[in-house]
Image (spheres, rainbow, N blue to C red):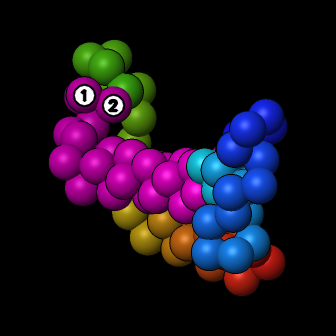
């Protein structure tokens, strides 16, 4: 994209390298973060997350699950939308 293909523009704006870098940074990475948060918050059990030590109170696990299931994906989505709007 910096040599012979440098004159090729995607969507009239980006070079090939710029397009791939922007899509992976502004869309794919946040999407993966949202997927990991939802998986950790909805699928994993307390013993899978924190081991068999049993030192975690149920209230603390509820707060952790709420953060992973609700708050963190929303925050990541807001960051993703603002970065896509700046593209």
Is 86 one of the magenta-colored residues?
Answer: no
Rounded to the nearest angstrom, the CA distance separating label 1 from label 2 is 4 Å
Q: Nearer the viewer, residue 78 or 9?
A: 9
Nearest the eye: 21 or 37: 21
Q: Image quarter for residue 19? A: bottom right
Q: How dense is the environment of label 1, judged by Cα within 10 Å: few (below 14), some, or many (20 and up)?
A: few
Residue 62 appears in the rendering? no
Q: Secondary structure at mark 2?
A: helix
Q: Residue 52 lies in what quarter of the image?
A: top left
Q: Which residue is mark 1?
A: 48
Main SS, magenta residues: helix
* Magenta extent: 21-49
In the image, taking residue 87 as reference, residue 30 lies left or right, namely left
| Place of residue 34 in the rendered image (x, y in percent of width and height, measured from the top left) | 44, 58
Residue 25 included in the magenta stretch of the image: yes
Mark count:
2
Q: Residue at x 46, y 58 (%)?
A: 31
| Residue 76 percent across, percent down from the top left | 59, 64
Residue assigned mark 2 = 49
Report if residue 39 is visible in the image: yes
Quadrant containing the C terminus is: bottom right
Residue 17: % across, % down: 69, 45
Q: In the image, residue 51 lies at what x, y percent?
A: 31, 20
């Amino acid at each position: 994209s910096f040599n012979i293909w440098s004159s090729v523009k995607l969507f009239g704006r980006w070079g090939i390298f710029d397009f791939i870098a922007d899509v992976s940074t502004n869309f794919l990475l946040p999407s993966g973060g949202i997927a990991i948060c939802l998986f950790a918050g909805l699928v994993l059990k307390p013993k899978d997350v924190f081991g068999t030590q049993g030192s975690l109170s149920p209230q603390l696990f509820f707060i952790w699950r709420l953060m992973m299931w609700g708050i963190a994906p929303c925050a990541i989505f807001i960051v993703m939308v603002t970065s896509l709007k700046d593209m």
